[in-house]
Amino acid sequence: MGKDGIKFPDNFLWGGATAANQYEGAWDVDGKGASVPDHMRGGDINTPRQIDVEFDPNALYPSHEATDFYHHYEEDIALFAEMGWNVFRMSINWARLFPTGEETEPNQAGLEFYDRVFDCLLAHGIQPLVTLSHYELPYHLAATYNGWADRRLVDLFLRYASCCLDRWHDKVKYWLTFNEINTGTMTMGCTLSLGTLKGFTGTMAEVRDDINERYNALHHQFLASAKVIKYAHETYPDLKMGNMDCFILSYAATCDPADQLANQDEMRRMNWYCSDVQVRGAYPSYARRFWDENGIKIKMQPGDEELLREGKIDFYTLSYYMSSVVGTHGDVEQGKGNMVMGGRNPYLEVSDWGWSIDSKGLRFSLNEIYDRYQIPLMVVENGFGAFDTVEEDGSIHDPYRIDYLRKHVRDMGEAIEDGVDLIGYTWWGPIDVVSAGTGEMRKRYGFIYVDKHDDGTGDLHRSRKDSFFYYKRLIASNGTELD
């Protein structure tokens, strides 16, 4: 037992998580096509990201180079191994394999790149956990089909995903279909996940949003995920197929029953709607009223409901960063910052980007999820974006990141003691990556610093922060050496 009486399972998975569009770079190298993030400029906490149909030669598109995993993967994986990881969550960029998303045969150079990455990981004793779609929709599918609003993407995705499963089923055991699929319940999902951007130029804040179109696009993602999972279960039964939800915990602002009901509605919409479909294989009981009250008419076709039942996930994964407050009295202070939703909790501190810091909320969330579904869970994103200062000697002291990590790991351990079947943890952005929400580099999450800046400058050299050594000690102790 650890110092706090908490013991993580002996086979617990420790590692980190990245996304190709924020990390990989090499956006047009070796036959890769453009993805939606490649058409997005950088922004900041006060300036939404701009989306362009045509590239502006004078603008900076952060995903084009990102932090260049494409050319640094061997160096980076060696650093991951030095920390003691046994799992790395990464994504495959759809447009690197199928540049427009419509091709019938994959790009060979793209396949060979991921061959090398997986072989390098396995040689270091790190197993890949692969997300098939992590905000990397080929831009051509957004521009031509209006993204997931078009049902034809279901089979295009199956072609891409089955190619991945066929090629790497012997190297990758754990697969996730869509990253944070529940962003489709929010307006920002039009940009990040659904790609309903046909002909659109403007900021993420100005993106057109048709709620009926959005929920039908999300329905198409449910079908695509189910088709891929059904294919995997039938063809490679040893594979484990999971979902991925952005779990945005909310609390009722007061004990007023009206606040409690408002928060229940918020939790259902934000957190349960998507996972109820993917875990249970059917839309939940409350969906019908929500559709009716919001003018949503799901274009259900014969066979859809059967497919959802046949494509249920094996394990549940989530990102967890913050919590919020829901109230009905009009006196709840609204949170401020990028991608902050809901009211501010006066009992919690916030980060420089306005995100509340609530490790106990992670314990609460894990208990709620596990009690609801009773399948293995994995926290595949959790992290702390902050300004980092490089000292004259090159060192980077980040006690704020260590403190955040320590508290969240401690409360994960408490959840395990509560009875939750938690199988793994991958810190978000273990190496500095481009922020998805703002396109910034200065919002750094990593244990590993990358010399890359918001103006595009930097030589991309890597260096270890203090948190690198803390995470290494924590992993070596299997989560027990928290101080």
Image (spheres, rainbow, N blue to C red):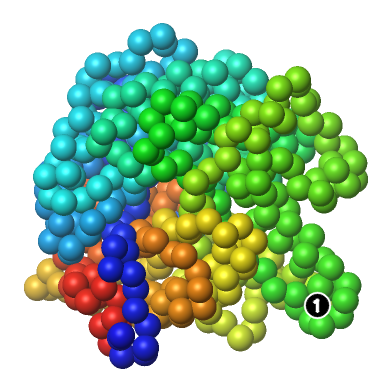
Name the residue at 40% across, 67% down.
Answer: 384
Residue closest to the far left: 393
Name the residue at 37% across, 21% down.
Answer: 163
Residue closest to the far top: 104
Q: Is residue 183 something that shows in the picture?
A: no
Most foreground residue, 324 or 81:
81
Circle count: 1
Amino acid type, callout 1: Asp
Name the residue at 70% across, 74% down.
Answer: 251
Q: Mark 1, residues whose alpha carbon is within 10 Å: few (<14), some, or many (≥20)?
A: few
Relative placement, left or right, of 366 versus 136 is right
Relative placement, left or right, of 319 versus 370 is left
Relative placement, left or right, of 371 versus 73 is right
Q: Position of residue 445 (x, y in %)?
A: 35, 62
386 w.r.t. 373: above or below: below
The quarter in which the C terminus is drawn is bottom left
- Which of the 4 quarters of the picture holds residue 235? top left
Name the residue at 9% across, 73% down.
Answer: 393
Q: Is residue 272 something that shows in the picture?
A: yes
Q: Position of residue 172 (x, y in %)?
A: 30, 39
Residue holding disc 1 = 331
Secondary structure found at label 1:
loop
Q: Position of residue 149 (x, y in %)?
A: 66, 26
The quarter in which the N terminus is drawn is bottom left
Most foreground residue, 397 or 308:
308
- Which of the 4 quarters of the picture holds residue 338? bottom right
Q: Position of residue 98 (x, y in %)?
A: 38, 19
Most foreground residue, 213 or 311:
311
